[in-house]
Amino acid sequence: MTGSHARAGVAAVLLLLPLTTAVASPPSTGAAVRAPQVAGCRVFPADNYWNTPVKHLPVHPRSREWLSHMSPGSLLHPDFGRSFGAQPAPYGIPITVVGRGHPRVRVHFRYASESDNVRYPLGRDTRIEGGQLQTGDRHAVIVDKGRCRLYETFATHRSNGRWRAGSGAVWNLGSNDLRPQSWTSADAAGLPILPGLLRYREVVVTGRVNHAIRFTTDVTNRRHIWPARHDAGSVSSRAYPPMGARFRLRSGFSLDGYRADTRAVLVAMKRYGLVLADNGSPWFFQGEASRRWPNALLDELKTIPARAFVAVDTRSLRVRAGSGGTG
């Protein structure tokens, strides 16, 4: 677990579930034909930013500059996989699915002014990143399959019978609405986590990933670009990437010789790219916590060089400032 979450310059700091993903081939431009689904709920509309291909968008004017400050000699690192050593739970961010009738509790937030202060469906069944007794980011991602609502928190823990978290955010999975400008979420970028997680079923079973992927880097600018709503950078320089920046694997990067599941991820990186959503180790990208991830897949993904990516200019996708829809 390497991500971090911060606000106002303070560093701060989520069960494998039934999942279906779109299997129809997306068009070469525009939105995917169908949005991915989790527990019968689509993960935002098909034209949402996360589900929109960027394969044919222009390279961002600051691509080379940003990449030069993102450990360009690094290799990608899948921040998910099987548990080992002192880690009791699989690496990654777990997804908990609940029904409409799940009890809801009040959560006490550190950043209450930027959190959705409603009752959250947290309980003993909630899977927390790293385990309920661990330290770290402790993200919780919960899908209410009856209402198709997404609840996310970070620094999640229960103390003296009370649930506490750094911040919390709730999304209607059928809507493109963004959070208020300058509000954080369970991510420093103020974005949802779920749509950027690689899920076991889509990668290994169906072999089709129809969305962008969440990732981190260590030094970011103190600004954010659409659709991000918040930033937590440590430098004030446009030479460093802002929250919300999007990167894609170069079209010429050869997929020859890779496993089928590795190719599924690499195709998604070419078509949908990566979204910079939090501070953390450079080029760490996230997936759901599952003991079933093949080690051979993870090993191949660790060989992909950061220099094979470019930053993408996504300004043409924005239709409305307060919406993540691309039209």
Image (tube, rainbow, N blue to C red):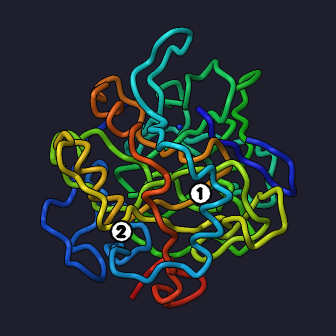
Q: How many marks?
A: 2
In the rendering, at what x and y percent does residue 182 appear? Answer: 75, 70
On the rendered image, what quadrant is the N terminus found in? top right
The residue positioned farthest toward the left in the image shown: 24
Q: Kindly identify the residue that appears in the image at 69 percent across and 33 percent down.
A: 163
Which quadrant would residue 281 be assigned to in this image? top right
Residue at label 2? 51
Which quadrant would residue 98 be assigned to in this image? top left
- Tell me how far mark 1 sits from mark 2, CA to CA: 15 Å
Do we see residue 258 in this rendering? Answer: yes
User: In the depicted view, which residue is nearer to us: 287 or 65?
Assistant: 65
Q: Is residue 168 above or below residue 176?
A: above
Question: Is 304 left or right of 283, judged from the image as shown?
Answer: left
The kind of residue on which mark 2 rests is Asn
On the rendered image, what quadrant is the C terminus found in? bottom left
Q: Kindly identify the residue that appears in the image at 42 percent across and 67 percent down.
A: 50
Residue at label 1? 277
In the rendering, at what x and y percent does residue 232 appear? Answer: 77, 58
In the rendering, at what x and y percent does residue 16 appear? Answer: 33, 33
Which quadrant would residue 252 be assigned to in this image? bottom left
Q: Circle 2: is it few (<14), some (14-19), or many (20+) Cα within 10 Å?
A: many
Q: Circle 1: is it few (<14), some (14-19), or many (20+) Cα within 10 Å?
A: many
In the rendering, at what x and y percent does residue 236 appear? Answer: 84, 67
